[in-house]
Amino acid sequence: MINSHKKFIKDNYKTMSINDFYNYFDKRYTKKQIRNFCNRNGLKYRKLNKDELKAALSVPNKKQRQQIQINHNYFKTWSKNMAYIFGLWCADGYIYRNKGYYFSIKLHKQDKYLLQKILDEMNSKHNIYENKDNSCHITFSSKTIYHDIIRLGGKERKSLDMNFPYVPNEYLADFIRGYFDGDGSIHKDNGGITICGTKEFLNELNNVLKNQSINITNIHQHNIARGNNTYKLQIYRKNEIINFINFIYNDVDNLCLYMKRKRDICYAYASVR
């Protein structure tokens, strides 16, 4: 465990539970490792309340997850929706191993319908779990999907060094739409587009957009004081914003996946310019 994470635990153990630390560090450490560190240092971490404990106990165990229906081969074949889900996962998902191989995507509660569409697309009968922080998530076990995500360019603990994966040209718009729905935003006032990611990921995204005649405004580090590898790609020129919107939504029909609230904002901006 790195020193900055040890210090974070020592500074926040009174208000955070083992589960909170586990999720905060993006599954980098097991719950047992975090618990052992707290015990060794006499840190009496926050216990789960009744509702949190009930939610934790409601998650299916490994055997139950394995029995629930899902298309384990879903990520073996490119399609518009597969590219979208992979893009969304690159922004708001993770994979991890903990006595099994797990795949998960986490979104805001207002986008719960989108998680259901993803489950339907993957022929899955898994549940959607709601969290205390106004988010919801899907999590299921699949060794095949875990390894397919890695084959596609994904990885565990990807937040610090995620590279832009290989995506066939015909599915780039769908992949970027998925990533934008996860880690992008369009500002209602000025229409500015912001997409967050690692420097490496955003530099390659910039190259992809240039090939589509979309010129960005800048890429700069987010929260320099923390010395992290989180950057922002921004587009502020009106015509370039319109070009970006047209690129990611041009070939979208009723069968395609997208986040409705973001598309509505994009369409509203494009229609009045």
Image (cartoon, helix red, strand yellow):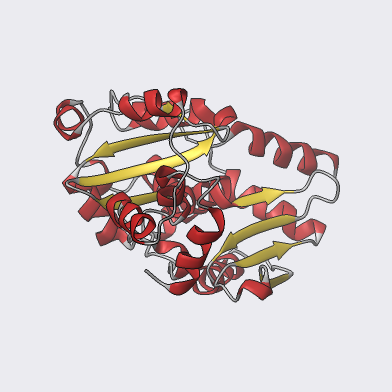
Query: Taking 26 as reference, is 243 left or right?
Result: right
Q: Position of residue 265 (x, y in %)?
A: 73, 38
Q: Nearer the viewer, residue 202 or 100?
A: 100
For the N terminus, the quadrant is: bottom left
Q: Position of residue 269 (x, y in %)?
A: 79, 42
Query: Taking 181 as reference, is 99 left or right?
Result: left
| Rendered residue at 43%/34% (across/down) | 48
Task: In the rendered view, tell whether residue 268 sits above or below residue 230.
Answer: above
Q: Residue furthest front?
A: 42
Q: Position of residue 4 (x, y in %)?
A: 50, 70
Q: Position of residue 81 (x, y in %)?
A: 40, 40
| Rendered residue at 56%/72% (across/down) | 228
For the C terminus, the quadrant is: top right
Q: Nearer the viewer, residue 88 or 141?
A: 141
| Rendered residue at 22%/34% (across/down) | 71
Query: Taking 95 as reference, is 233 left or right?
Result: right
| Rendered residue at 47%/42% (across/down) | 46
Task: In the rendered view, tell whether residue 191 sits above or below residue 198.
Answer: above
State which quadrant residue 127 falls in: top left
